[in-house]
Amino acid sequence: MHILFILMLCAYLGGNVYIYIRGLQALSHFPPLLKWVYSIVFWAGVLAMIFVFLLRNLKISATWMHIFSNIGTGWLVFTLYMVIALLFFDLFRVFNHPVPHSYIISLLVTVCVLAYGYFRYQHPDTQVINIDINKSLTNSASTVKVVGISDVHLGFGTTKKQLRNYVKMINAEQPDIIIISGDLIDNSISPVEQQHMEEELSELNAPMGIYMAPGNHEYISGIRDCIAFITQKTPIHFLRDSVVTLPNGIQIVGRDDRTNSARKELSQLIRQTDPAYPIIVLDHQPYELSASVNANVDLLFNGHTHDGQVWPLNFVTRKLFDVSYGYAKRENTNIYVSSGLSLWGPPFRIGTTSEMVVFNISLKK
């Protein structure tokens, strides 16, 4: 893990050195003062990303940290697209066909792409999935509406105002059940408590309850602090290697995150359920999908991947995971891997989408 972090940091710094040098070349005929301004602004953006991680646990104004976080993490994606654009134009230089003003063109294209990505992030989609389960409930109902969300990442990135909009979006669907597949909290519980986000979370409305399994970011934020906040200040039922059976017979299994190497096997948890009634499993990271299929789980709901969040990283997640995004059916098991209602870090969705998932479940009468 440390080696991977070092490699990523070297790639980030190396990419920015490349962009910086190409920028100085573009400014070669301009006054020295403009070059100094360019240098200061550029390296402030580069270092902002590093400082975001160093300062995330400090009690700084949420508004300022939100701005600082967007600039710092946004610079990651700025670096990615500027490097791609500049390398594209440098290919023409290699073959003695330089494109005039290639740096300015690259900058304009990158800014436009980021603006589009920010707009897409601010306007989540609603995915509607219709599922038939050949099981009955204990009452006479034959349909259940379940809203599934994951990867909200509350903190300095996803603010109280954004959460308020998410809650309205969820409640507008009038769900019977709300399920959350991990990473409700981002990197620290401090900004969540500082902004009193429990006020918005307490407005979530589902007659049959709200259920959540932990993600890796609950561990990053401090699993004990996250559990205390969620269970003591919100109506969310926190399921950590535990099972809850609803009055109508639906059973919800919440697995602990893979971060905890001592988490229980799914087979152990399934033994606490009745196969005659519907079984929903919440498991943040979409590994070991076959375990849910073998256990005859009716609905497996995952998150974590963000579908790569920005192109071309979605190609990477598709190589890493059997199902990296969307719906799949394996035997009797319905699998859905969500790209997340919000996101981690850079506030952009490019080639992917933020989403809420609505499961319309039909059952035997």
Image (spheres, rainbow, N blue to C red):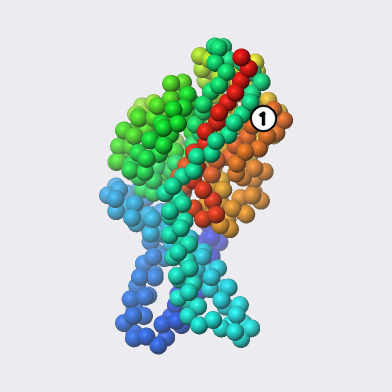
| Residue 19 higher or lower than 67, as above or below | below
Residue at image x 48%, y 68%? 109
Choose between 229 and 200: the one closer to the eye. 200
Q: Residue at x 45, y 70 (%)?
A: 108
Q: Tally the numbered discs.
A: 1
Vertical comparison of 215 with 320: above or below:
above
Please tell me in which quadrant of the rendered image residue 233 appears: top left
Residue lying at the far top of the rendered structure: 139
Who's the residue at 55% across and 31% down the image? 359
Q: Amino acid at mark 1?
A: Thr
Q: Please indicate, yes or no, whether residue 18 appears anywhere in the rendered image.
A: yes
Residue 259 screen position, x and y as percent: 54, 39
The part of the image, by quadrant, that contains residue 92 is: bottom right
96 and 294: which is toward the camera: 96
Residue under label 1, please give it: 333
- Is 91 situated above or below 28? above
Q: Residue at x 61, y 77 (%)?
A: 91
Q: In the image, residue 146 lies at what x, y percent?
A: 51, 28
Spot the residue most to the left. 61
Image quadrant for the C terminus?
A: top right
Q: Is residue 354 above or below residue 148?
A: below
Q: Is residue 355 left or right of residue 329?
A: left
Residue 99 image point, x, y percent: 54, 81
